[in-house]
Amino acid sequence: MRSHPAFFVRCAEAVPSPCCGEELKIIGSRKRTLISEGGEICVLVVRRLRCVQCRKIHHELPDCVVPYKRYESACIEQVVSEPKVSSSVAADDATLRRWKNWFQGICTYLLGCLTSIAIRFHQDPVENLSVPSQSAHHRIGHYVGDAFGWLARIVRPVVNSNLWVHTRSAFLST
């Protein structure tokens, strides 16, 4: 059995519970496999945290992780942002197609989340431009930009606002 490098994930700041804003206590850890663009596998040891108020359990994920996905966020970002270009990500075509379909399906929801977060923090939500046929992906760019790392810039606030939804089950097939 081949061993993979393991990295311990530790946040330097005290992050409150995304549900109620109360303190999180460490209750353990779990291993999380992460696959890079070239197909290399590393193991992340992420802390499990429980809210002292609402008792919900959360996992401390770094920005390179998209919840419920096994590949780095940069890999998924590369595939969904340039659908016509062949990808250098070491994944099969079915996986690449699932990522594209997943993002297309969740894009409008993420846009709504970003708008909600902007309103919640008393920031002006981005207004639609004069071009009415903008895709949801294009409109998301007005919130987080289109420079490398845009997917991580979406995931973090949505997850930390407790708005991330689990959209697929491993037992369902399409």
Image (cartoon, grey):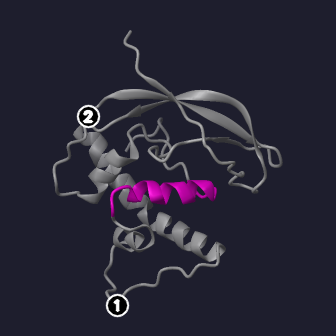
Tag in front: 2 or 1: 2
Disc 2 designates what residue? 38
Of pointers 2 and 1, the one earlier in the residue sequence: 2
What SS does tag 2 mark?
A: loop
Image quadrant assignment for residue 28: top right
Residue at coordinates 28% horizontally, 52% vertically from top-left?
78
Q: Does the magenta stretch include residue 28?
A: no
Q: Does the magenta stretch include residue 148?
A: yes
| Foreground residue among 150 and 95 | 150
- The image shows a total of numbered marks equal to 2
Say if 38 sits above or below 64 in the image.
above
Say if 147 sits above or below 118 in the image.
above
Main structural element of the magenta stretch: helix, strand or loop? helix
Residue at coordinates 60% horizontally, 58% vertically from top-left?
163
| Foreground residue among 36 and 96 | 36
Type of amino acid under label 2:
Gly
| Label 1: how many Cα within 10 Å (few below 14, some 14–19, many 20+) | few
Disc 1 designates what residue? 130
Question: Which span is picked out in magenta?
Answer: 147-164
Residue at coordinates 29% horizontally, 31% vertically from top-left?
39
